[in-house]
Image (spheres, rainbow, N blue to C red):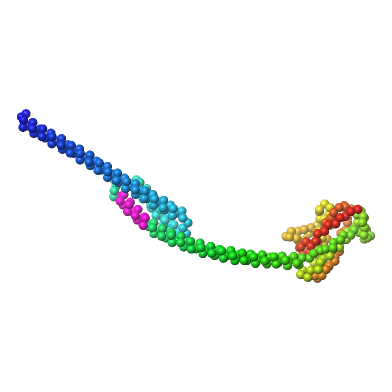
Amino acid sequence: MNKRTKILITSFSIVAVIVIAALVFFSLHQHKQMQEIVEELEFEKEALQDEYEDLAIQFDGYQQLDIQNDSLQDKLAREQQRVRDLLEELRITKVTNARRISALKKELATVRSVMVTYVHQIDSLHQTNKRLVVENTEYRRKNEEMTQANEQLSNANNQLTQVVTRASMLEITDFECIMLNKHNRKTSFISQVTKLEFHYTIQKNITCEPGSKTVYMVLRGVDGEVMQKQPVTFEYENGQVPYSVSQTIEYMGEEYMGTMYWTIDEDLIQGDYAADFFIDGNLCGSFTLALKK
């Protein structure tokens, strides 16, 4: 090999090394650039994904509002599902698919503009509802005032009715029980008693409606049980009350003195007895009497 050939070989070797080095450098530089591009695309995708997630959260918040508009609620639900679908598509889209990511970015802008429209509608409904709430509150306040006024008037009427009712109630006084023997003569020996004679006085009351009145006497023995010859009752406070003796009289508003009798069918027990009088469904007098030997 001559000297010239050696020089040529050496020159080619040097050139080859330089070319290879240049290729390696260029390849490394390209790889670095690609890596930077991929990282930038990943960053853009993550940022876009965050924006979609924020938008989905906003839709969730609006869906939880009490929106009194079915049409608007349906539209919100559709857009909410659309955001979820786009978000899911973005998650599975490769970062290198720049075209689709760009399209999803445009979709995001569209959805946002739609949301702005819905937000304005929701705000309008909210303002309308606030106005209606104020109006309803004022209406309820006036209604409550009217109800209270009616209740006061009703209470006044009830009180007046009660006063009139109490004023028209008859009152029995001057109650007296006389023990009679078999000769219808007064006796003080309980063992000789065959009949009890009761005297009572109905006080004068010009407010009571005059006419036929039935006086019921409920006579209770020492044991507290009502003394009866037969099971008879009268109506009192929506119930039936057993009584011992009744008497029908003509009451014309003036003082009335009446007498009732109770026949003894068996030996009396000494002790305290009670007599209650009722007229027109009202308790008109309660008395106690002591029967002793």
Give left or right: position of 86 versus 126: left
> x%, y% of residue 153?
65, 67
> x%, y% of residue 101?
31, 49
> x%, y% of residue 205?
79, 68
In terms of image quadrants, where is residue 198? bottom right
Residue 110 on the magenta span? yes
User: Is there any visible trace of residue 228 in the rendered image?
Assistant: no
Q: Residue at x 84, y 65 (%)?
A: 201
Q: Residue at x 41, y 51 (%)?
A: 57
**Above-or-below relation of 206 to 40:** below
In terms of image quadrants, where is residue 228? bottom right
- The magenta span reads 100-113
Of residues 280 and 11, the one drawn nearer to the viewer in this rendering:
11
User: Is there any visible trace of residue 224 in the rendered image?
Assistant: yes
**Above-or-below relation of 286 to 17:** below
**Farthest-out residue, right:** 183
